[in-house]
């Protein structure tokens, strides 16, 4: 193993830079030449490859986003695109690849590994929706960002006795909504896995007219119903005026938390350890406070599920 490449792909997540730093410096520690690939898999097709040394990843740990930039490459989803990527990697003298990203990025890494090109995947996504992975890089930071907004919005909601709807990330999974709603003391949480609960929320709001508490915080994952649509429904069916805040891309940025920096550092170093030991086709993760790995096939044979006990707990505590 003489030369290893690293790239980030898909949506950015706080902590990606810490992971890049760990991958590069761990490789250099073992005497391996390290290269960074800019703009994800598209960067391989365009031969956008640059040498990386210890200095190139200095003072990046605290930065959000990704210094290698990210790009969604449609061509990589085809066999021809994957074959060209492998050809370009070999022509550049790259022996293995570390892929940092979410589900789509890791599924692409799985395809490359199945074609016998050594790949290790590092899960990094604020949605935290990779099967079998408890904590993806970026989730903790995004969660704390959302909770900060909930706390701020609650202050003004209580002052004006106005219900507030906060729309958070979560196109296909409600992890951010569920965790932030529970930690932020939201009265109602609406997630893609429970879209039908929108009607229940409206009914609950109708029946709260006799309560002393005259405002509510409702957390809505973007894949369940939009905040604007729920606002209109509450006004039409329950006669409740509410304010809508869409957090959007504010959830993706910002300095990573200590937890995400530690997670990224450990997983980045472990990815290099696996490649040095001729391991490939693996996703790295932490279990019982130790770095472990699963085959790509094992990861993607499972379904991503929410924690039902947390959902029911949020209902119990929202009285």
Image (cartoon, rainbow, N blue to C red):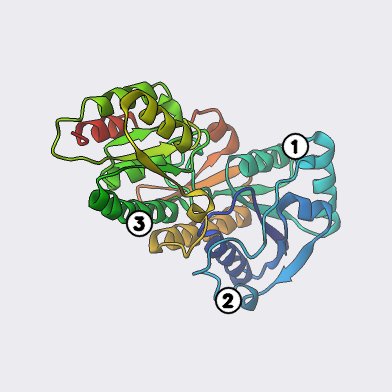
| The image quarter in which residue 235 lies | top left
Label 1 CA crowd tier, 10 Å (few <14, some 14–19, many 20+): few
Q: Earlier in the sequence, mark 1 or mark 3?
A: 1
Label 3 CA crowd tier, 10 Å (few <14, some 14–19, many 20+): some
Residue found at x 50% / y 55%: 250
Residue 16 drawn at (x, y percent): 55, 59
Residue 99 drawn at (x, y percent): 64, 51
How far apart, in angstroms, are the residues tagged by discs 2 and 3? Answer: 29 Å
Label 2 CA crowd tier, 10 Å (few <14, some 14–19, many 20+): few
How far apart, in angstroms, are the residues tagged by discs 2 and 1? Answer: 33 Å
Q: Earlier in the sequence, mark 2 or mark 1?
A: 2
**The C terminus, quarter of image:** top left
Reading the image, the residue beneath label 3 is: 148
Reading the image, the residue beneath label 2 is: 58
Is residue 44 rendered to the left or right of residue 113?
A: right
Residue found at x 44% / y 42%: 167
Residue 227 drawn at (x, y percent): 45, 37
Reading the image, the residue beneath label 1 is: 77
| The image quarter in which residue 70 lies | bottom right
- Residue 305 can be seen, yes or no: no
Judged from the image, the secondary structure of the residue bearing numbered disc 1 is helix
Question: Between 191 and 216, which is closer to the camera in this rendering?
Answer: 216
Judged from the image, the secondary structure of the residue bearing numbered disc 2 is loop
């Amino acid at each position: 193993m003489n030369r290893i490449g690293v790239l980030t792909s898909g949506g950015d997540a706080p902590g990606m830079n810490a992971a890049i730093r760990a991958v590069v410096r761990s490789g250099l520690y073992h005497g391996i030449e390290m290269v960074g690939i800019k703009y994800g898999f598209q960067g391989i097709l365009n031969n956008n490859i640059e040498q990386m040394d210890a200095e190139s990843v200095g003072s990046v740990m605290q930065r959000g986003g990704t210094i290698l930039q990210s790009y969604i490459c449609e061509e990589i989803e085809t066999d021809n695109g994957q074959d060209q990527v492998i050809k370009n990697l070999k022509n550049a003298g790259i022996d293995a690849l570390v892929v940092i990203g979410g589900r789509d990025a890791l599924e692409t890494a799985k395809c490359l590994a199945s074609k016998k090109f050594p790949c290790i995947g590092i899960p990094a996504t604020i949605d935290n929706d990779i099967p079998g992975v408890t904590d993806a890089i970026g989730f903790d930071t995004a969660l704390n960002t959302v909770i900060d907004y909930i706390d701020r919005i609650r202050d003004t909601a209580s002052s004006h006795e106005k219900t507030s709807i906060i729309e958070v990330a979560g196109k296909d999974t409600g992890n951010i909504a569920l965790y932030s709603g529970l930690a932020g003391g939201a009265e109602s949480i609406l997630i893609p896995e429970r879209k039908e609960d929108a009607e229940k929320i409206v009914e609950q709001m109708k029946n709260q007219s006799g309560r002393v508490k005259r405002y509510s915080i409702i957390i809505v994952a973007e894949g369940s119903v939009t905040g604007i649509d729920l606002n209109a429904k509450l006004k039409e069916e329950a006669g409740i005026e509410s304010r809508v805040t869409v957090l959007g891309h504010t959830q993706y940025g910002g300095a990573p938390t200590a937890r995400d920096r530690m997670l990224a550092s450990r997983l980045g170093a472990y990815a290099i350890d696996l490649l040095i030991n001729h391991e490939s086709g693996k996703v790295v993760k932490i279990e019982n406070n130790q770095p472990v790995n699963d085959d790509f096939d094992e990861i993607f044979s499972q379904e991503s599920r929410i924690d039902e006990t947390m959902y029911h707990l949020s209902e119990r505590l929202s009285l």
